[in-house]
Image (tube, rainbow, N blue to C red):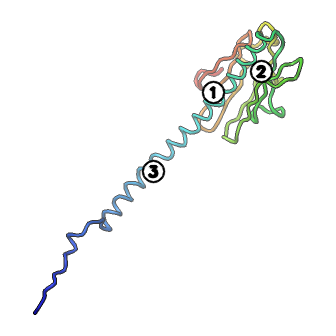
Amino acid sequence: MLCIVSMPSLKGLLGFTLIELMVTLAILAILLTVGIPSYRQLVETNAISASGNDLYASLQLARSEAISREEAVRVTPTGGDWTTGWNVVVVASSKILDQYLLGANGVTITPLGALSSNDVTYSATGRSTTAYNAAQDYFDVVSDAARRCVVMSTTGRPFVTKEDECP
């Protein structure tokens, strides 16, 4: 008895052809080339916003604690450099209320004007012990992608501005 076995054709097999795979990889490469620089800028912009907002929050905390404790509270840079971080400290007892350490995220914080004295102290009334000028006294928070400013009002109330609104 003669048995004939038929071979299935290659057209009936499921899978990808080499051409389909190459086209898919080419499209993926184009999308990554366009998307990665935008993603990098997004990450850097978020890092600058977070650092500026964290500094603002620490200044607000110091002001609030000075009022509620009825004693002076100071925000001072870690190791004399704002870029590495800062501490919120009760002046009389040297008790650290809050500590913020800035990671290696490419953000640089530079105090300008009267802020270059390296600390911000709030009295028991919540006013700054230094009269600031908003046009000159601010923290410049900078990275390669963006810039924010934490500006001090004449009473010491901080507020955050975007790059085009910096003094």
Q: Residues within 10 Å of mark 3 (few under 14, many from 20)?
A: few
Please, what is the three-letter code of the amino acid marked with disc 2?
Gly
Q: Position of residue 114 (x, y in %)?
A: 80, 19
Q: Residue 148: which disc?
A: 1
Helix, strand, or loop for circle 3? helix
Work out how far the residue at label 3 is from the one at label 1, CA to CA, in angstroms: 29 Å
Q: Nearer the viewer, residue 98 or 130?
A: 98
Q: Nearer the viewer, mark 2 or mark 1?
A: 1
Which quadrant is the N terminus positioned in? bottom left
Q: Which residue is mark 3?
A: 32
Q: Residue 113: which disc?
A: 2
Please, what is the three-letter code of the amino acid marked with disc 1?
Arg
Number of numbered discs present?
Answer: 3
Asked whether, in this view, residue 58 is left or right of residue 119, the answer is: left
Q: Residues within 10 Å of mark 1 (few under 14, many from 20)?
A: many
Please, what is the three-letter code of the amino acid marked with disc 3?
Leu
